[in-house]
Amino acid sequence: MSRKKKKFASFEELEERKDSVFAKEFEAFYAKGVTTLAEGEIIRGKIVGITGKEVLVDIGYKSEGILALEEFDDESDVQIDAEINVLLEKKEDENGMVIVSKRKADRAMGWERIINNYNEGDNIEGRVSRKVKGGLMVDIGLDAFLPASQISLRGAKNIDQYIGNTYQFMIVKVNKPRKNIVLSRRELLLKEREVNRDKLLKEIEIGQVRTGLVKNIADFGVFIDLGGVDGLLHITDMSWGRISHPSEMVAIGDNIEVKILGIDKESNKISLGLKQKSSSPWVGIEEKYPAGSKLKGKVVNIVPYGAFIELEKGVEGLIHISEFSWTRRISHPSEMLAIGDMVEAVVLNLDIANQKIALGIKQTESDPWKGISDKYPAGAKVKGKVRNLTDYGAFVELEEGIDGLIHISDMSWTKKINNPSEFLKKGQKLEVVVVSVDEVNHKISLGLKQLTDDPWTGLVEKYQIGTQVEGTITKITTFGIFVEIDTELEGLVHVTEIALEPTMKVEDSFKVGDTVKAKVIKVDNEQRKIGLTMKDEAYQSEAKTEASAEAEA
C-alpha cells in the first residue's frame, strides 16, 4: 500500500501555527506564575495605567490588578512606573478582573511595623486624616483612632480644625486580635503641662508681667493659662474703670499681658491683674477734685440709694438720693437721672483710703431752706395744703418743696385723735401756726390747736368731780364709750363704769349718736382726760330706757 504524500502548508498557515504555539507557551508561563500568588498576599507592583477613577498595577500576573484611585491619600503620588505595595484581594472577580488594595497593604505592613517597634505608653507621630463618629482617624502608618475626649485638655467642640495637621500622640491601647490602636493627644498635653507648671512655679514672682492665653470667661473674672498653670484675673482687677462683664475686654483665645498679684504654691492658685500695669487714677485725686469744687461727669450706674458718676476712667463719685434736690421729694434716682446723662455736681467730701467721692447735685443751686426761719417765724399764722397723711401727723405744703408737719398731738387741745384722717383730708387747704423751725435739718413744726387758746383750764373749772353731764356718744370700743360733753371735749366711760348685765356687751346696749347722761368721776390735768360713770341708773341713756319700755310692752 502506497503512502500518501503530505502537502506543504502555505506561508499564512505556517504563521498561524507559530502564533498558536507561542500563545500556548505564554499561557503556560503565566499559569506557572499564578500558582505562586495567593489572595491576601502583599505584592510589589508597578503602576502601568490610570483610567478614570481606577489605577492599573502590574503585579506579574496574566492581567493587571485594578486599584481604586481613592486609596491614595495624595493623588499626586499616582505616577506611571511608580512602584507600590498592594494586597491581592481577588485573583478574579465576577468580571474576570484582578482586584488589589493599596490601603490594606499599607495597613498590614504598618501594623507589623507598629507591633514590632511600639508598645502602649509610647509616643508616635501621626497625621489626622478624617473625622469619624466619636473622634478622628490618625495616619500613623495605619489608621488609628483618636477619641474626641482625648484630642485636647478641655475637649474639642470643633474637631474639624485638627484634620490635616500632624501631632505627637501617645499609644494608649493596642487590640491585637482586632488590629486596632487607640491614641491620645491629651495625655501628652497633660505631661507637658505638668513639666511647664513645675518650671513656671519655680520662676514666677509677684510683680512680674507675664503673657497668658484666655482659657475661660466667667461673670466674676477670666482664667488665664500662663503656660502650665492657670491664673485668675478677677473682674475688679481688669480695669480702673467700670465694666459689667469680663467679655467687654477679652475673648477666649486672646493672648494678654498680666501682672502677678499673688501666688499660692500649695494650691497652685495665682491671682492676676490687668489694671495694675498702669498707675491708679486715684493718685493725687484730692488735688484734682478738692471738696467744694464743681465738676461734670457721666451717669454710669443707678441704684435705689443714688447714682454713680464717672469723673474719668477709673474714678467715680456717688450722688446719694438725699443730695439730689433741696425741695423735690425723690423716691428713686431714675426720676431725675438716666444712665449716660452728663451732670454737674459739687464734691462734698473725699475718702481716699476707700476710693470714694461724695457728690451732690442740689449744691449747685442755693438752699431754699436758708433763712426759712425769717420767712416762717415761730408763732406766725400761715396757710398751706395737706400734702400727705401719716399715722403720726399731716404734712402741709407751705410752698413748693417746703413742707411742715402737724403732729397728731398738735391737732386738738382736748379731743383724742387716733389718726389724722379723722381730722384732716389730703388736699385740704387750711391755716396753721408755725410752732418751730429747724433750718439745719430742714424741718418745720406746725400746729392747728394753736389757732385757739387752750380751753382746758376753763373746762376743768366747769367739770368738777361729781358734775352731772349729758352728751353724745362719738365712739364705742371694747373698753368703753367716748362721750362728747362739750365742743371738742370728750369723756371716757370705762366699761367697768357702765351698769350692764353679765351677758350684755357695750355695743349691744349703745350706738354712736345716742345721747347719754353721766357723772364726772376723774379729771387728769396732765393727760387732759375726763373719766365718767354711768353706773347710777339715772345716768343711763334715754335710748336704753326707751328700749326697755318697748320690751316690757
Image (spheres, rainbow, N blue to C red):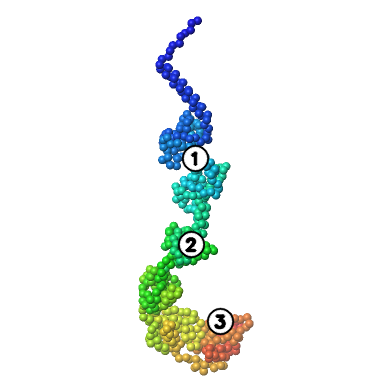
Quick one: label 3, few (<14), some, or many (20+) residues within 10 Å?
few
Residue for point 41% across, 35% down: 80
Which is closer to the viewer, label 2 or label 3?
2
Q: In which quarter of the image is residue 536?
A: bottom right
- Helix, strand or loop at mark 3: strand
Q: What residue type is labelled 3?
A: Thr
Tags 2 and 1 touching, CB below 8 Å: no
Mark 2 or mark 1: whose residue is earlier in sequence? 1
Q: Which amino acid does label 2 sit on?
A: Glu
**Quick one: 95 or 447, which is closer to the camera?**
95
Residue for point 47% across, 66% down: 206
Across and down, in percent, residue 48 comes to 43, 33
Residue for point 42% across, 88% down: 378
Figure disc tally: 3
Residue for point 41% across, 72% down: 282
Across and down, in percent, residue 550 comes to 58, 82
Quarter the C terminus occupies = bottom right
Across and down, in percent, residue 109 comes to 51, 40
Mark 1 or mark 3: whose residue is earlier in sequence? 1
Q: Residue 106 carries which label?
A: 1
Q: Residue 477 carries which label?
A: 3
**Quick one: 374 or 46, which is closer to the camera?**
46
Q: Distance between the residues labelled 1 and 3?
A: 107 Å
